């Protein structure tokens, strides 16, 4: 019954910006780590950015300095602000949250449905 819903994808020109959102709902005790992944056609799904509950972040080398991940815990929401977009950023982007459904269990991973980001040259 935990569900992650993404929004914000679309078509942008190279050099443009886009912000993705991911909202969790359902039976949630806490959200430990929020992350964004992306998947190119026919390729593996790769980590783009990660943020801990305390706000510590890390990024894939390919997006450092261009993308920024953030979270609003009270809204159970993560964001990915993307700027200086390049055609090679074109992919399906997925959010992934580590969620505890009670105080007696460890985190499980939950995935959003994916949102398409297309960057034209």
Image (tube, grey):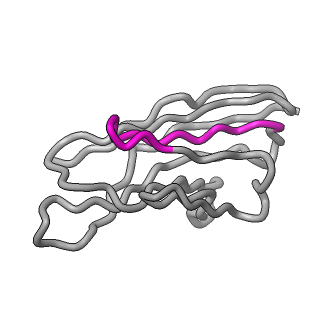
Is 15 above or below relative to 37? above
**Residue at image point 37% right, 43% down:** 73
Q: Position of residue 59 (x, y in %)?
A: 67, 61
Which image quarter holds the C terminus? Answer: top right
| Residue 20 shown left or right of residue 64 in the figure | left
Question: Which residue sits furthest front?
Answer: 54
Residue 43 falls in image quadrant: bottom right
Magenta span of residues:
71-84
Q: Is residue 30 left or right of residue 55?
A: left
Image quadrant assignment for residue 102: bottom left
Q: Residue 13, image x and y in percent?
A: 82, 26
Residue visible at 22% across and 73% down? 106
Residue at position x 63%, y 53% in the image: 41
The quadrant in which residue 90 appears is: top right
* 45 falls in the magenta region: no
Q: Where residue 10 sits in the image (x, y, percent)?
A: 62, 27
Residue 81 part of the magenta segment: yes
């Amino acid at each position: 019954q935990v569900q992650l819903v993404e929004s914000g994808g679309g078509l942008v020109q190279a050099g443009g910006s886009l912000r993705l959102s991911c909202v969790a709902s359902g039976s949630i005790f806490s959200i430990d780590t929020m992350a964004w992944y992306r998947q190119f056609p026919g390729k593996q799904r790769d980590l783009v950015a990660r943020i801990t509950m305390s706000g510590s972040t890390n990024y894939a080398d390919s997006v450092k300095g261009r993308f920024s991940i953030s979270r609003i815990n009270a809204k159970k929401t993560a964001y990915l602000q993307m700027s200086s977009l390049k055609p090679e950023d074109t992919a399906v982007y997925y959010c992934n949250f580590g969620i505890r459904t009670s105080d007696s269990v460890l985190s499980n991973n939950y995935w959003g449905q994916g949102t398409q980001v297309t960057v034209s040259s």
